[in-house]
Image: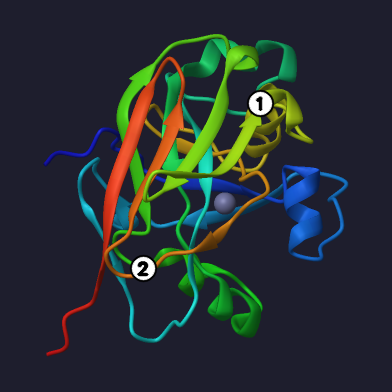
Amino acid sequence: MTQVVQPSKIVCIGRNYAEHAKELGNEVPKEPLIFLKPPSALLPPGGTIILPPVSRQVEFEGEIGVVIGKQAHRVAEAEAESFIAGYTCVNDVTCRDLQKTDGQWTRAKGFDTFCPAGPRVVSLDWRSLSVVTRVNGIERQRAPSSDMIFPIPRLVAHISAIMTLEPGDLIATGTPAGVGRLVAGDVVEVEIPGIGILSNHVAAQETQ
Ligand code: ZN
């Protein structure tokens, strides 16, 4: 299995849907809240998400992924779309318990296999995108991109004012309401109609 994306960095957005911020008891942010996932967390379509034994609450987060097409440094929001190569499905897998106890999110969101992405990158109008997540065939999340607090061009402008975005870099644009736990044996799917379905199995880490 080969990776669909080869980013130098994965920039994620927290709390970009009002209903999701509410379900976790968080305020809606006044500007985009960003964090990084390591590229070592990437998992291709069909790959297996491995549950680390240190966590008792690993959750899915279906998200719209933005793939950068050309180097972006301090781009204006009005110009941001021209720096985007296309969009793909992302699952921002998260240890919800460690996210709370650690106080920052590097460990909770950084385990190997915690960033499934794919199955392809498609150039579409971001205004037409929506994301759907299913676990074992049951729908758990569904939201249009219009529900985002900060729209995609704003995110590209905001991030590129902080760090230069390189071609291939991936932005995970935040998850809508409906997040929930994954257990060994589950099959989790993130779908963006018009792009495809990112499907991954879930398994416990084998003990040494
Ligand atoms: Zn997320």
Q: Which residue is mark 2?
A: 111
Instruction: Please give the name of the residue rendered at 47% of the width and 74% of the height, measured from the top-left corner.
Output: 107
Assess disc 2: are there few (<14), some (14-19) or many (≥20) residues with their C-alpha within 10 Å of its C-alpha: many
Determine which quarter of the picture holds residue 112: bottom left
Tell me where residue 68 appears, x and y as whole percent.
Answer: 45, 25
The residue sitting at 35% across, 24% down in the picture is 196
Res 206 visible: yes
Q: Position of residue 143 (x, y in %)?
A: 65, 32
Q: Which residue is tagged 1?
A: 145
> Which quadrant: the N terminus?
top left
- The yes-or-no answer for disc 1 within 8 Å of ligand 1 is no
Q: Nearer the viewer, residue 168 or 188?
A: 188
In-image side of 10 versus 12 (left or right): left
80 or 107: which is nearer to us? 107
Residue 74 appears in the figure: no
First along the sequence among labels 1 and 2: 2
The quarter holding residue 96 reads bottom right
Q: Report helix, strand or loop for mark 1.
A: helix
Looking at the image, residue 162 sits to the left or right of residue 180; the answer is right
Q: At 54% from the left edge and 80% from the top edge, which residue is drawn?
A: 98
